[in-house]
Amino acid sequence: MSQLLIEQPEQHTQPIAAEATAPEWQIEAKRVTKLYPKPGSRKEPTAVLDGFDLRIEKGEFLSLLGPSGCGKSTFLNILAGLETYNGGAVLVDGKRVSGVNKNVGVVFQGYALFPWLTAQKNVEVGLEVRGIPKDERRERAAEVLKTVGLEHAANRLPHQLSGGMRQRVAIARVLAYEPEILVFDEPFAALDAQTREFLQAELLRIWEAGQTKKTILFVTHSIDEAIFLSDRIAVMTKAPGRVKTIFDVDLPRPRDSTVRSSEDFVHIRSRVARILEEEVNLGNAH
């Protein structure tokens, strides 16, 4: 069996390739530190991220795995401009992240839909905030609902939709204003296994069908989900989190459900699981 992944040695910085072949890094995190104060205490603040380094290439699909509490979602929020950080630098297209970036779209585990608005109107909300004219936002919302397979449900309210359909509306809302970067914070975690796998395949279909692939950072606790979706997987240490190991997932695209039972998939899973288990065990030992 051919070697299908590269496990990088533990390090604080990813090696920079020769200039002639250097990837186009769209996202760069350099020695990022994030501290949270302890409520009602004069003790030193808690470090959630410490020396966090990560580079994501333009058009890449990268998943972030790690033990609970290691700072995965914290970094996602920092990248989206929803949280500040205490040290290091986070760059998007070479510019330091400062506040919410309209070129970064966020999809959370909770759908965050307005219950009194139809699916169509929920998708239009973000466009209205950005000042898109009424006719154009109607057209764009209808188009993106079709992309996610929900054109038939455009006039339904959220309570009339299944969990999977509501999550597709949330994805459509982000896609509608065409951000360059998409960040997902465990978007399918609350769904049943069958719906989860269906939406994983739908996300890949949408991403691969785009004329220009979006850059995606996907936070998950599922090793199988990370492998099925990603070009690379970054595994974090226990808190305070940093990137411990990065795996290349060299499985052919487009991918379908059959890849999950392949020998190559199983091999990658065992390698990722071993590294992740090491960090989980270290966390439990303290």
Image: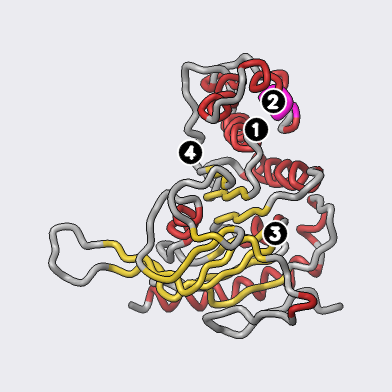
Label 1 belongs to which residue? 176
Could you tell me if the residues under marks 2 and 3 are in contact, i.e. CB atoms within 8 Å?
no
Q: Give the magenta-colored segment's residue range.
A: 141-146
The quadrant holding residue 124 is top right
Q: Earlier in the sequence, mark 4 or mark 1?
A: 4
Label 3 belongs to which residue? 58
Q: Earlier in the sequence, mark 2 or mark 3?
A: 3
The structure residue drawn at horizontal position 69% and vertical position 25%, both measured from the top left corner, is: 140
Relative image position of residue 211 (x, y in whole percent): 81, 44
Distance Cα–Cα, label 4 vs label 1: 18 Å
Q: Earlier in the sequence, mark 4 or mark 3?
A: 3
Could you tell me if the residues under marks 4 and 1 are in contact, i.e. CB atoms within 8 Å?
no
Q: Nearer the viewer, residue 275 or 32?
A: 32
Q: Quadrant of the N terminus?
A: bottom right
Distance Cα–Cα, label 4 vs label 3: 27 Å
Question: Looking at the picture, which amino acid does disc 1 mark?
Answer: Ala
Q: Quadrant of the C terminus?
A: bottom left
Q: Nearer the viewer, residue 116 or 18?
A: 18
Distance Cα–Cα, label 2 vs label 4: 23 Å
Question: Looking at the picture, which amino acid does disc 2 mark?
Answer: Arg
Point out which mark residue 140 bears: 2
Could you tell me if the residues under marks 1 and 2 are in contact, i.e. CB atoms within 8 Å?
yes
Taking the magenta stretch, the answer to whether it contains residue 203 is no
In front of the other: label 4 or label 3?
Answer: 3
Question: Looking at the picture, which amino acid does disc 3 mark?
Answer: Lys
The quadrant holding residue 88 is bottom left
Question: Looking at the picture, which amino acid does disc 4 mark?
Answer: Gly
Point out which mark residue 142 bears: none
Q: Earlier in the sequence, mark 1 or mark 3?
A: 3
